[in-house]
Image: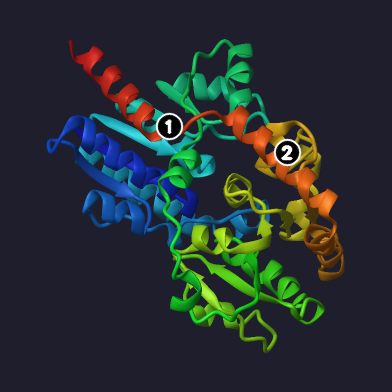
Amino acid sequence: MKYYIIAGETSGDLHGANLIRELIKQQGPNAQFRIVGGDRMEQASAQKAVLHVRDMSFMGFVEVLMNIRSIAKNLRIVKEDILAYQPDALILIDFPGFNLKIASFAKRNNIRVFYYISPKVWAWNTGRVKKIKRIVDHMFCILPFEVDFYNQWGMKVDYVGNPLLDAVASHHADTTFGSVNGLEDRKLIALLPGSRKMEISKLLPEMVKLVPLFPGHQFVIAGAPNFDADYYSDYMAGHRLPIVFNQTYDLLQHAEAAIVASGTATLETALLNVPQVVVYKANAISIAIGRKLIKVDHISLVNLIMHREVVKELIQDDANYKHIANELNLLLNDASYRQKMLSDYQKLREIMGEPGASGKVAKHILDYLRARNT
């Protein structure tokens, strides 16, 4: 069977790669792929991406408007390529601003649409569920509360568990991490400033201001694969912090605490049992619009799943080095505060269940396709 898989962000690239491996495992060598994604999906499929995630990831209302021509060009390229490829299944991974437009196009052209990792319609613009029901054949959800949400709208979905559980479970800690990367013999603080230019440019300058405030720790940056070390140096204000690429899990497993940009990484950090403070900054206009539209009380996945504050969220003006330093000091030096977060992480893992999401999605897709062909 022929699969066309689209992931427009770094996190989606990870899940897309794991899904590709499962489809190959369950279907065999006859599985063929065309991808829009990143390095991991390219490696898993042995195919060059039609478009790479580095050229696609724009976040925030203002940022999207500023790049509207690039987005329109990307949509045109992908639509033409899908028609030329004629896949048995179009598999869309998160990235709703782009992927829902592609889903509409595919539906008009009688191409089967599978959506893996639901758009966060429960957070804002819930009316989009009506459109999703029309254009998506099968939705695979990774958060427990999403199933009830869709059921309220009369839409049946498949809950598959969270693919991050697969990624974390399959990771084997590298005991040579410190020596290989030339790190000092000090406790580590992991800095995860995000995978987008906007996030890095706004968050990293505040993060590096913490360095002189915690002289007993070494701060290490988790670099996104779509950037190089020179890009990060522009935001370090003269500090020369170590940067590690494609080793985020190893960094977290060796860290005493972490400062994490809101997104998938907050959940990964919790699953790896690292105390954290969540930070987020964007264009001021984007934030103002978001605050009017978003209907949830939290932004981090950890707090959303737990329905309460487990990790501190510092947003926009609050995401400054002084506030971050106060929270980091609690994580490092207040034993009861730190233990409370770690205990909540344990409850989080119990709610999320067992690994196996990628395999479940692959099986569902194959079962649905085979049922249609019989």
Q: What amino acid is labelled 1 in the image?
A: Ala
User: Would residue 28 be found to the left or right of residue 133 on screen?
Assistant: left
Q: Residue furthest bottom?
A: 238
Label 2 Cα crowd, 10 Å radius (few <14 / some 14-19 / many 20+): some
Q: Position of residue 17 (x, y in %)?
A: 34, 47
Q: Position of residue 170 (x, y in %)?
A: 40, 46
Colouring scheme applied when the structure was drawn: rainbow
Q: Amino acid at mark 2?
A: Asp
Residue at 59% x, 71% y is 221
Do the residues bearing badges 2 and 1 touch, measured as CB atoms within 8 Å?
no
Residue at 47% across, 59% down: 70
Name the residue at 17% across, 10% down.
374
- Residue beneath disc 2: 344
Q: Nearer the viewer, residue 329 or 260?
A: 329
- For mark 1, give the secondary structure: helix
Residue 210: % across, % down:
77, 75
Label 2 to label 1: alpha-carbon separation = 23 Å
Quadrant of res 316? bottom right
In the rendered image, the vertical position of residue 226 relative to residue 286, given as above or below: below
